[in-house]
Amino acid sequence: MKTFSAKAEEVKRKWHIIDAEDQVVGRVAETVANVIRGKNKAIYTPHCDTGDFVVIINAEKAVFTGKKETKKGYMSFSGYIGGHKTEMVDRRRARRPELLLETAVRGMVPHNRLGRQMLKKVHIYNGTEHPHIAQNPVKLVVKRRGKKATS
C-alpha cells in the first residue's frame, strides 16, 4: 500500500462561517487553525495546504477567560532602541477588535511560507455583515469546554 500525499491543486475547498459572539478567543482560534490547515479532513498532509476558507463574524464580541481582558498585553518591537511597545486587550479591542482573533490564529499555524498562505483563507469581520454570501458558507460551531464540536 502506498502512502497518500495530497496536492494543493486537487483539494476541494469549502467555506465555513463562525459566529464569535460570546465565544472564547482561544477556542475560536483553535477551531479556525484546524480548519484552515485541513486537519479536519482525511486527506490532511502536513506539507500541503489542504484547508478550507473560514469567515468569522462578530469578532468584537469574542471574550477572554479569567483576567485576560485587563491583564493580557500584546508586545511589539520596532527594531530601534526604545522601540518596545505593549498594547493591552482593551485598547486593541477599541482600536481594531479583529486583530485579537487574527493574532490568536496566527500563533496556531506554522510560522513559515505555508502558514502565511493558510492565513489568507481567514476573513474576520466585526459585525454580522460579510461579502462572502455567494460562497454559501456552512455554519461551524466552536466546541465549548467539555463538549465536542459539531458542524
Image (cartoon, rainbow, N blue to C red):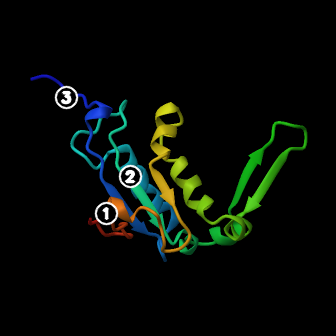
Residue type at the position of mark 2: Phe
Q: Nearer the viewer, residue 81 or 48?
A: 48
Q: Secondary structure at mark 2?
A: strand
**Of 129 and 117, the residue lying toward us:** 129
Of callouts 3 and 2, which one flags the residue occurring earlier in the amino acid sequence? 3
Q: Which amino acid type corresponds to the residue marked 3 in the rendered image?
A: Phe
Q: Quadrant of the C terminus?
A: bottom left
Q: Which residue is mark 3?
A: 4
- Asked if residue 127 is positioned above or below residue 14 in the image, the reply reads below
From the viewer's perspective, is residue 15 above or below residue 45?
below
| Residue 27: % across, % down | 45, 62
Q: Residue at x 46, y 34 (%)?
A: 114
Q: Is residue 40 left or right of residue 127?
A: left
Identify residue for label 1: 136
Residue 1 location in percent, x, y?
A: 9, 23
- CB atoms of marks 3 and 1 within 8 Å: no
Most extreme residue toward the top, as rendered?
2
In this rendering, the label closer to the viewer, 2 or 1: 1
Q: SS at mark 1?
A: loop
Mark 2 or mark 1: which comes first in sequence? 2
Q: CA distance from mark 3 to mark 2?
A: 23 Å
Q: Which residue is mark 2?
A: 53
Q: How packed is label 2: few (under 14 Cα within 10 Å), some, or many (20 or more)?
A: many
In the image, what residue occupies the spot 67% across and 64% down? Answer: 96
Q: Is residue 69 left or right of residue 85?
A: left
Q: Nearer the viewer, residue 6 or 142?
A: 6
